[in-house]
Amino acid sequence: MASNLSQPHFHDEDAAFAYVEARVWPEGPVCPHCGGVERISKMQGKSTRKGLYKCYQCRKPFTVRMGTIFESSHVPLHIWLQAMYLVVGSKKGISSNQLHRTLGVTLKTAWFMSHRIREAMRDGDLAPLGGEGKFVEVDETYIGHIKSKPVGRAFHHKMKVLSLVERGGKSRSLVIDRIGAEALVPIVKANLDRETHIMTDEAHSYRYLAHHFAAHSHVNHRRDEYVRGEAYTNTVEGFFSIFKRGMRGVYQFCGERHLHRYLAEFDFRYSNREAVGCNDEDRASRLLSGIVGKRLTYQTTCARA
Ligand SMILES: [Zn+2]
């Protein structure tokens, strides 16, 4: 990982702009004010801001940072690229404290950057996972604590997560309020192709799934059954194990309001992992395609903390 960080876009601001522009504007500059693509000129001159363009259709200036997670941040672009590379390259995530020390930015800035990077990782793709001949493992887990709620029955005071993991493909995780067929079945139906072969454990919540999908197999963990032919949930359990180690060890848990962002981070790394032919550099490059339209203002994140 360290050797890749020697590339120019991690150290040189001009190279960083060129790197980001090539990914955000593959067809050439696009004006974020009016959407225009013609009559755009790059502004030159010693005192001009880096990466500054002017649109002669609406007569407004802009840079590639505008309208992305980099907007209204004073952190140089090459430092942002280093941060993104570190986040996508670390298996269990990287704490704000570690980013602060590695990048030499303040802790507050590091915290802000990591939340924005997580926002860029949020997959806007709502297309269902799975499909004909594909297996998707579905399982739920509990994490952390909900501070404001009284401790009632077991697990009621914990945050709940539902993950759908396609074997050999992507993962998609959601924060859920309740466990139980009524809550889970509609979510599973909305996120999976009907031709999918679903794999779960024996939980009661999943008993109606067979009606909605090509097939439904389950293993009975209570009877010590973990693998029966194609029936197992080891893939989704492996995903939960990385997620929990990261949340416990690196992030020391988070509030309920931020949980979906951390899940987006673990889903992103899983869905773009080595095993599906994605190295650290590909992952960093893919992350850049998620920066557009994801402005997250400082006030928004703080208000939710
Ligand atoms: Zn314009």
Image: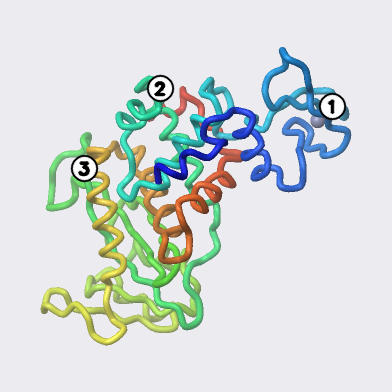
Q: Is residue 263 left or right of residue 297?
A: left
User: Is ligand 1 within 8 Å of the beta carbon of the residue shown at mark 1?
Assistant: yes
* Residue on which the image places disc 1: 58
Q: Position of residue 302 (x, y in %)?
A: 40, 25
Looking at the rendered image, the disc whose residue lies closer to the viewer, 2 or 3, is: 2
Alpha carbon separation for disc pair 2 and 1: 36 Å
Point 57% across, 23% down: residue: 72
Q: Is residue 245 left or right of residue 289?
A: left
Alpha carbon separation for disc pair 2 and 3: 22 Å
Q: Earlier in the sequence, mark 2 or mark 1?
A: 1
What is the secondary structure assignment of the residue under circle 1? Answer: loop
**Quadrant housing residue 46:** top right
Alpha carbon separation for disc pair 1 and 3: 50 Å
Looking at the rendered image, the disc whose residue lies closer to the viewer, 2 or 1, is: 2
- Ligand 1 occupies quarter: top right
Contact? badges 2 and 1 (CB < 8 Å): no
Vertical side of 275 occupied by 227: above or below: below
Q: Position of residue 90 (x, y in %)?
A: 35, 46
User: Crowding at label 3, few (<14), some or many (≥20) Cα neighbours within 10 Å?
Assistant: some
User: Is ligand 1 within 8 Å of the beta carbon of the residue shown at mark 2?
Assistant: no
Q: Position of residue 209 (x, y in %)?
A: 36, 75
Farthest residue in the bottom direction? 229
Which corner quadrant holds the C terminus?
Answer: top left
Q: Amino acid at mark 3?
A: Gly
Q: Is residue 296 visible to us here?
A: yes
- Residue 105's disc number: 2
What is the secondary structure assignment of the residue under circle 3? Answer: helix
Q: Amino acid at mark 2?
A: Val
Point 51% across, 36% down: residue: 81
Q: Amino acid at mark 1?
A: Cys
Q: Position of residue 4 (x, y in %)?
A: 47, 44
* Residue on which the image places disc 3: 249
